[in-house]
Image (cartoon, grey):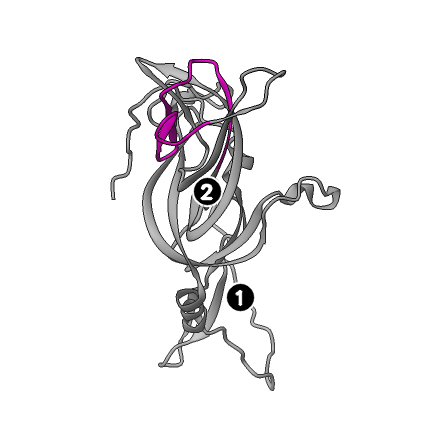
Amino acid sequence: MEPKKITKIPENTTGYLRLDFDKGQFDALIENKGYPVVWERAIPCPCTKGDKNPPQSSCKNCEGTGWVFINPYEIKGIITSINKDTKYREWSVERIGTFAITVNSKHKLNFMDRITVLGSKSVHSERALVKKIQDKYFIRTIYPIVDILDIFKLESVYKKLKLLEFGVDYIFSGNQVIFNTLESGDSISISYLHELQYHILDLNHDVRNTVVIDNYSREQNVELPISAIARRTHTVINSYEFIGDEIFNNSYK
């Protein structure tokens, strides 16, 4: 059976002006007015061994999250509708900590890709239990730490919280806080500064193409910038369950 031939029947547009999008202006807007961000591709970690199995907390690739982030690139992106935290407003419960980002069409954003906004800091607070590996007592925070505002230890529900002192009670590096005076199982709360970090959850303009006339009066199909919706990391990944020290870097570019 021969495949059917598709015949294109053009519409009659005689007498109407032709309006083409200018890809160069879109790209220039992103380059000149966009935020500098680091874009990392997300791949599902094979440690889950199928969609029905949970990630393995001992995995040195995904840190127990089920996702591996690779090949960081610094790019530019137009960011709009930044919404830090409205979870207590019923009308916007589905928009907790979201933003819209538009990037050049050559950057093929995908589900769960990680976006870190450079030079833009925010505060995040967490509760955590101190863990032990070998002779080290530590916690892992969701975001890499720029600076710690305060850490409080619960000594008893009948006592005032104990404020810990940097350099005496703890030190930190990346998203790990190492304690000198705490034990495994101690309960702490931490507030810290971090760079804004999001994950792509929806591609409202996965493909945005247009037809333009080139310098030789020929029609060409060109790709315009694409747009996505992203959400703050702590609303997507609750915690890093990984108990260990070494973490593998799977980037290859």
Q: Is residue 182 left or right of residue 86?
A: left
Q: Marks 1 and 2: CB-CB under 8 Å?
A: no
Q: Residue at x 37, y 49 (%)?
A: 38
Q: Quadrant of residue 80?
A: bottom right
Q: Residue at x 74, y 45 (%)?
A: 91
Residue 23 visible, this angle: yes
Q: Residues within 10 Å of mark 1 (few under 14, many from 20)?
A: few
Examine the rendered structure and indicate whether residue 184 appears above or below residue 191: above
Looking at the picture, how far across and down is residue 117, in whole percent?
43, 51
**Residue nearest the observer in this picture, 42 or 197:** 197
Q: Residue at x 38, y 29 (%)?
A: 176
Range of magenta residues: 164-191
**Residue nearest the observer in this picture, 53 or 215:** 53
Amino acid at circle 1: Lys
Q: Residue at x 60, y 73 (%)?
A: 11
**Residue nearest the observer in this picture, 45 or 170:** 170
Amino acid at circle 2: Leu
Dot 2: what SS?
strand
Residue 204 visible, this angle: no
Q: Residues within 10 Å of mark 2 (few under 14, many from 20)?
A: some
Q: CA distance from mark 1 to mark 2?
A: 57 Å
Q: Is residue 216 left or right of residue 82?
A: left
Q: Which residue is mark 2?
A: 193
Q: Which residue is mark 1?
A: 8
